[in-house]
Amino acid sequence: MTTIDEYRRGFSEDPGYLDFAAFGPMSRSVADEQTALGEILVRGRYGAASVFDEQDIRVREAVRRVARFPTDRVVFQPNASSGLMHAFFGLTGQVLYSAREYPSIPLAAQRAAQALHVLDPITMQPPQGVVTPEVVRDNLTPATTAVAVSLVDYRTGYRVDLEGIRDVIGDRLLIVDAIQGFGVVEVPYEVADVVVAGGQKWVRAGWGTGFLGLSERAATDLVPIVSGVTGTIVPLGGSYEEVPPPLQGAAAFQITRADPIAQARFATALEGIADVGVATIEASITQTVSQVIDIADEFALPVSSSRDEAERAGIVVLEPGPEQVTSLTAALINHGITATLRDGTVRLSAHVSTGEETFEALRGALTSFSSSVQY
């Protein structure tokens, strides 16, 4: 078992970094793993390449420890969007999602609908962009066969109630884009049928990493339309003169061999998360986010994201007046604060490694901002 302090010491990003919802700087252990396997790739020593073959089961076992999907219902993906493409191209019927979703969900739904003509994307307009069980219930129709949601909304930082949504949608498929909360919030992934996430944000494994996890029903019902050479039944003797059929289950949803070094990075990061425990990480981030909110309150900056711990993850959204956006942006830049600026809001996102130096930098930025505001 790893303590939260031991886990925290594995990171070394510069003070002022508050943009984990965009990407999370890798831990030293992940970087070391990349270096070690990269050296094997450089040297090509006889027999050493077997370590690359071991990474597929390793990464699926690491996903199992965090997301609780059996390893045979997990397949590595190079990013969350690829997993969503596999899922939506395998669907038929009517799929419901928020019109304010991050583009990965609507693009996958629309592309599948345009290409195959068996999927009917339907959007809902949730108040303030917040997807609740009540909003989903009010937008369901008898034709709805699947509902797609983000675990944490990228604009508002709102964490959806997965169990509540499962209750209202019944036996329809539930598809979850978990990238904005995977690894840092403890949620019941088992109520979902499809879960995808990438590792470049909160998992802090770098780009080119992710997974697709399927329920037993989804592993059977989804059609593996985009299934390549590694997603097929290997013929005896290795001859491909005839196109082989796809594998059964999650393994069918892959196109070609994955990057084993990316798999190793993802596995290393997930093993670290599993060793300390997602619930422990969540408790630490909850405290950190509360500190960010407290600093915003000191300077009377409006916080538009939820203050309820059950409705948030690592994101805090500040919404200054339109006339204040430029001066706030300048103050943050001048004090070395890395954040996301979008649609007149400032999105700050904190991790377990966010420390006092970052809080002081943020406080300094807001002090400069407040002194420049004209009342």
Image (cartoon, rainbow, N blue to C red):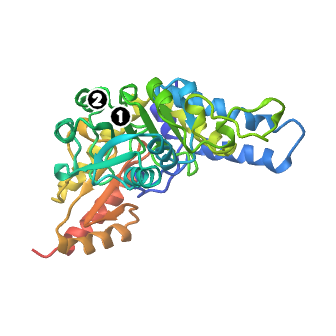
- In the displayed structure, would residue 67 be above or below residue 211? above
Q: Which quadrant holds residue 233? A: top right
Task: Write the residue at 47% across / 23% down.
Answer: 216
Is the Cβ of the residue at disc 2 closer than 8 Å to that at disc 1? yes
Q: Secondary structure at mark 2?
A: helix
Q: Which quadrant holds residue 103? A: bottom left
Camera-side residue of 71 and 366: 71
Disc number for residue 224: none
Task: Write the residue at 58% across / 31% down.
Answer: 60
Give x and y (percent) for residue 206: 56, 50
Task: Write the residue at 59% across / 35% down.
Answer: 252
Camera-side residue of 237 and 131: 237
Report which residue position mark 1 lands on: 174
On screen, residue 4 versus residue 243, left or right, reads left
- In the displayed structure, would residue 297 be above or below residue 252? below
- Amino acid type of the residue that numbered disc 2 sits on in the rendered structure: Arg
Q: Residues within 10 Å of mark 1 (few under 14, many from 20)?
A: many
Residue extending farthest to the left is: 375
On screen, residue 303 versus residue 65, left or right, reads left
On screen, residue 75 versus residue 359, left or right, reads right
Disc number for residue 166: 2
Q: Residues within 10 Å of mark 2 (few under 14, many from 20)?
A: some
Give x and y (percent) for residue 21: 40, 51
Quadrant of the frame with the C terminus: bottom left
